Amino acid sequence: MSRRKLAVRLTAVTAALAALAALGGCADEVSSKATEGGGTGGKGDHVKIMVGGIDKVIYLPAMLAQRLGYFQDAGVDVELLSEPAGIDATTSLVAGNVQGVVGFYDHTLDLQTKGKSVESVVQLARTPGEVEIVSNKAAGDLRSPKDFAGKKLGVTGLGSSTDFLTKYLGVHDGVSVDRFTNVAVGAGQTFISALQQGSIDGGMTTDPTVAQILDKKIGKVLVDMRTPEGSRQALGGLYPSSSLYMNTDWADQHKDTVQKLADAFVRTLAWMSTHSAKEIAAKMPSDYAQGGEGLYVKAIESTLPMFTKDGTMPADGPRTVQRVLKSFNPNLKNATIDLEKTYTSEFTDKAKAKAKAEPEAK
């Protein structure tokens, strides 16, 4: 073989290997379309939804709706994508790469101050579902947010909802945001590693990471916001978090599609409210239970109180979120926010009426 032909062949091989590497690096962005029966649906409108960490229990309804086949039943073909932090998912929405995000409602307020009109069309949760964890090593002098000064605290990403809530906890207890450092460490194993290695003194995360940390006995709960009671104690009220939010213009121009999504999500929430954590876990992908099936069931059970039963926005929720964000965010402190433009009940009201008229078969 001539040197010229060999060089051409090597170039082709190199290009192929590079393409494979690129595909592997995009693992988090690979769509998840698996239904309970193994099908993909493939019928109806096609919608891309970015989830701020698809294996987090706080965002469980997105994958559960897919696994139950409810998107397919509603006539919409949903492609679920994943980003490790909510702020990254929001960036994808604003850039027009996806039509919707399953992430925290508080981003809709933050985006309004930046001239972006985004609204929650289905409110999945009424509390944050977040837990402030402290490492065993730091537990002696980090016993509440009053002790945040000088500490390094893990968050999923800077500008994420965990970043927002950590700042609020500090400010509320008299520690200004310039006196502690939030460190972007993601969730899951990266969070656990940062805690074990001492890269952070504590941090905010969700299940199943919380359950794994407690099981390994490498950290303790400092603030628990998974239940309505915990949310009221830490934040002074219910704090609507996980939601399906979309660009308002897109939602207005695709009402039929949004309604199908709302129908599927409301149906999923109703199913969750009548099934046990063990039954819910059985419907989820097996690789979500990284700490073992029993631990995953426990993680779901601990987080279930955060979810709404029908996608309804808590009456005082938006005002609580606004108050929390204004306490530390200079962009919101002096801004006039039109809360009515940050969410809509149009689609969930219709979905609930439809569900009432056509009860789920037993």
Image (spheres, rainbow, N blue to C red):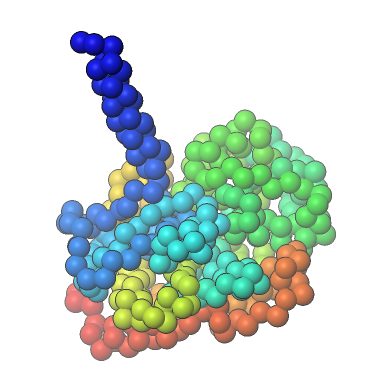
Residue 122: % across, % down? 43, 75
Q: Where's the N terminus, which quadrant?
A: top left
Task: Give the residue displayed 22% in from the left and 67% down from the top.
Answer: 72
Q: Nearer the viewer, residue 171 or 79?
A: 79
- Total tally of numbered discs in the picture: 0
Q: Eyeballing the image, is 23 above or below 237?
A: above
| Residue 360 placement, left or right of 170 | left
Asked whether residue 236 is in view, the answer is no
Residue 345 appears in the rendering: yes
Left or right position of 154 against 214: right
- Quarter of the picture holding the C terminus: bottom left
Q: Measured from the top left, where is residue 15 in percent x and y? A: 33, 30
Q: Position of residue 155 (x, y in %)?
A: 61, 49
The image quadrant that residue 135 belongs to is top right
Residue at image point 36% right, 62% down: 48
Residue toward you, 240 or 341? 341
Q: Quadrant of residue 264?
A: bottom left
Residue at 56 percent across and 82 percent down: it is 341
